[in-house]
Image (cartoon, rainbow, N blue to C red):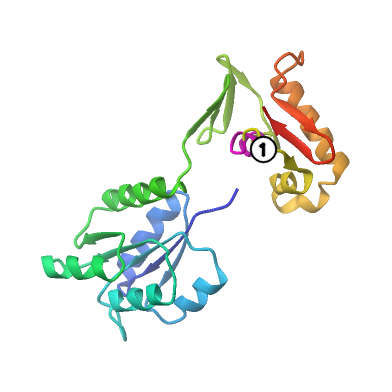
Amino acid sequence: MKEIEIVIIEDDEDILELLEYHLIKANYSVTGFLSTDKVETFLEEEDVSLMIVDRNLPNVEGSEFIAKLRDKGYDIPVIFLTAKDKDSDIDEGFERGADDYITKPFRIKEVLFRIEAIFKRLGLKEQNRLKYRDLLLDTNKRTLTIEERTIELTNLDFNLIYTFIKNINKPLQREFLRECWGDSRDDAHEKTINVAINRLRKKIDPDGSKEYIVPVWGIGYKLV
């Protein structure tokens, strides 16, 4: 499953390392920069979901850098994390493209909550528990329960049922489902996919009475 990529621009190495540590611990993918150099090139090459930007940066002021990105059409959400704490500074930060503004010194837990709030608004933050019919998937524990009965899942089983629950009633092509194999997706041929789906169907619906996952002729499968 796709990771959420966060870029941090912070010229204080200690603060940068602190943020990187806690964001990685929170299961985000993080890339840190000590200046704005090479950031725009990175944005062109990577799919970035959020930027955390200091305003007191070498060579260019952080909010000016973001304003230039906004003028170029970048709409990546931005949180300014800065010592500039006057009312006029905060107003200026939002005028130049901030989605949120946090002043230093800061509490790391507050930063994490604010990040999560932005992702929830954007629909990027995954819910811990996904429910459909009597299927209950816990993405933290990586468990599936049906009517309070825990179903033993392999990593592949989990990836497949997660993908189906995120795409309810949508016919999913076998090529799309191959992504559930991760790094070994090249080994997931049509027959392999069919076998894996049938194994999962038997686990979650042994007698075939509930028909959670059904084949779609000429396409693949869907959760109904």
Left-right relation of 181 to 127? right
Which residue is at a point 45% across and 76% down the rendered structure image? 39
Residue 83 lies in quadrant: bottom left
Residue 10 lies in quadrant: bottom left
- Above or below, 77 against 71 in this view is above
Looking at the image, can residue 31 be seen? yes
Left-right relation of 82 to 88? right
The residue segment tinted magenta is 161-167
Left-right relation of 142 to 114? right
Which residue is at a point 45% across and 46% down the rendered structure image? 123
Looking at the image, can residue 86 be seen? no
Q: Which residue is mark 1?
A: 170
Residue 210 lies in quadrant: top right
- Quadrant occupied by the C terminus: top right
Residue 36: image location, x then y, percent: 39, 79
Q: What secondary structure is marked by label 1?
A: loop
Residue 153: image location, x then y, percent: 67, 29
Residue 100: image location, x then y, percent: 28, 58
Which residue is at a point 72% across and 18% down the rendered structure image? 205
Residue nearer the viewer, 168 or 40: 168
Q: How many marks?
A: 1
The amino acid type of the residue labelled 1 equals Lys
Residue nearer the viewer, 99 or 51: 99
Left-right relation of 83 to 138? left
Based on the picture, tell me whether residue 59 belongs to the magenta stretch.
Answer: no
Q: Single out the residue that lies furthest toward the right.
A: 191
